[in-house]
Amino acid sequence: MQPSTLSRLFVYAKGSQNAARENFTTEALAAAVRDDSAPLLTLLLEAGVVSAAAKLIKVLTQMTVPVGIIDLVLLFDASEVWVEVKVDAPESGNQLTRYLEHVSNAPRTKVVTLAKTPLRADVVPLTWQRLRRAIDATGTTSPYWRDFRTYLEEIRMADAFDEPISSAERAALGPAHALLRKVARMLVPVAEAAASMAPHLGWRVTEPDVLKEVTSKLRAHGVMSVSTRAKLRAGISFGTFPEDGDTGVGAWVWSYPSATAVRRQLLGAADAGKLPIEWERSPVDWEALGAYRRLSEFADHNAAATWLVERLGELESAGLMKLLPALGLAVAGEDEGSDDD
């Protein structure tokens, strides 16, 4: 009996960081294709890999062939497509050369890559960005594809930045610049307070440095925040973020999602230290602990900054600022998608 997608996700998500990510992504992609093949077939058709009449028969993953292991194999009624899946990784050795040589006398089999950017001029390049576009273009209602589209954005393989600029976005440049500068100035006294409470965590405190950091966070994550600079498995951030058509302001304690033991320690310490119940607790995602308000609730910079400093004071009183270094240093590869820049 064919193993379930979930079983395969569990098995193939093990290994080195890059291999685990690529295997996981491949299995998730295969599940989406099995549910609705239209998005991937649209991409293959656009690239000239298959014809409009091609009928997909079977989807296989991690298939062993004489020259290696193929990430994704698409069996059509009259052809076969080998897909080498890459997530932030280059070609491994001469694998593509081996594949091309092996299929050189098999015209029914084609080799393609699916990556963020083309890998080689002699291999048909499919990109995650074009796949994301195909998901939208086909109008698929498959929950697998809708989730996969979000996942591609989360791991930064694709984004919405090639879509048409809306009227609201065209009118936002001036206000966006003003908001950036105002938020940076608002966060300076908060950063100074944080540095006074916990200098061992490292903070940017001057206005030019805070502006540089919030600009970097806006570019990378769509938030304007200041974070601990110490390279630890957990840290503290504070700043602003999008909130249902408005702007939110908050402070949060984050940890790497894969560091489940660290997350348990943070949540346990919050309860032991009597961190106020207003702080949200989460056993998943990046934000283990968070206190949030809408920016519109504050009369001015000073009111918002004062509220943030009070929240940092609660973290200090609960012992969380002292706890962070004891949780250990960030592990190589564990900081994928980190809130830090």
Image (cartoon, helix red, strand yellow):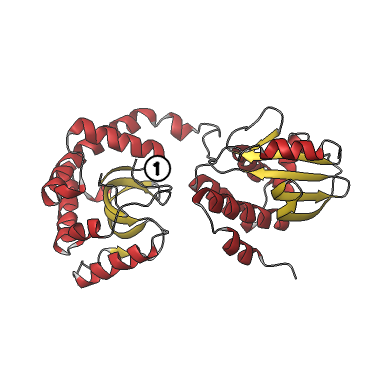
Check the image and report above or below for 209 versus 84. Answer: above
The amino acid beneath tag 1 is His
Check the image and report above or below for 258 versus 201. Answer: below
* Quarter of image, res 220: top left
| Residue 63 falls left or right of residue 198 | right
Instruction: Please state the horizontal and vertical placement of residue 152, each as a whole percent of the image.
Output: 55, 46
At x 30% / y 37%, what residue is drawn? 214
Check the image and report above or below for 82 versus 97. Answer: below
Instruction: Please state the horizontal and vertical placement of residue 266, each as a whole percent of the image.
Output: 28, 64
At x 38% / y 60%, what residue is drawn? 259
Residue located farthest toward the right when viewing the structure as drawn: 78
* Quarter of image, res 107: top right
Task: Please tell me whether mark 1 sits on a helix, a strand or a loop.
Answer: helix
| Residue 71 falls left or right of residue 194 | right
Assign the N terminus to one quadrant of the image. Answer: bottom right
- Which of the pair 61/100 is nearer the observer? 100
